[in-house]
Image: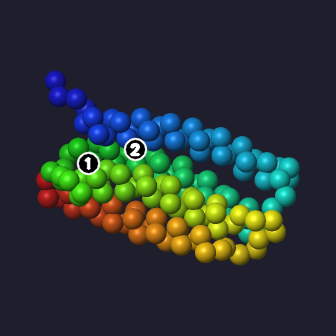
Amino acid sequence: MEPFLSSESRDLAGILLLALVTVETGGLYLLRIVSGRESVTPFQEKFARAGHAHAGVLLILALVCQPFVDATDLTGGWAWLARSGVAVSALLMPGGFFFASMGRGRTEPNRWIALVLLGALLLAVSLATLGIGLLTA
């Protein structure tokens, strides 16, 4: 019987599952914010929520993509992009939200917001690559 996942997908899935544990622990910080035990501006609270939500959703999406990548004929850089691009965007986008809002009393994003845009671009290209790969397999 052929394995359900390639070794590449299985390895990345294991890493993604462990990364989800870090999102869970990051939720503790968010609980401190919403319970008033952490002093932040309304802007920082919104960005903390956005970063946390993007991290969880994008890691789950990256997990979902793994068996689909194995169902394509993509190779080389295209396969890497389809397999790993969503996972990398799960680092870039939340990182952008968190870093852009760091600093006592911050009320607007700093230049780290560019990571959100870079992550969004990578996400779009990765998903388009996977979608085309599936349609042409």
Q: Residues within 10 Å of mark 1 (few under 14, many from 20)?
A: many
SS class of the residue under badge 1? helix
Q: Position of residue 33 (x, y in %)?
A: 78, 53
- Rounded to the nearest angstrom, the CA distance separating label 2 from label 1 is 11 Å
Q: Residue at x 34, y 48 (%)?
A: 65
- Which residue does the numbered mark 1 point to in the structure image? 69
Please identify the quadrant where the N terminus is shown.
top left
Which numbered circle lies on residue 63? 2
* Residue at left offset 57%, top offset 64%: 96
Is the residue marked by circle 2 packed among few (<14), some (14-19), or many (20+) residues within 10 Å?
Answer: many
Report whether 50 appears left or right of 78.
right
Q: Circle 2 — which element?
A: helix
From the viewer's perspective, is residue 82 above or below residue 46? above
In front: 113, or 136? 113
The circle drawn on residue 56 is none
Q: Are marks 2 and 1 in contact (CB under 8 Å)?
A: no
Vertical relation: 65 (above or below) 130: above
Direction from residue 34 to residue 65 in the image, left or right: left
Tell me the quarter of the picture where residue 125 sits.
bottom left
Residues 95 and 5: in front is: 95
Which residue occupies 65% across, 41% down? 25
- The colour style of the image is rainbow
- First-in-chain label (2 vs 1): 2
Hey, which residue is sitting farthest top in the picture?
1
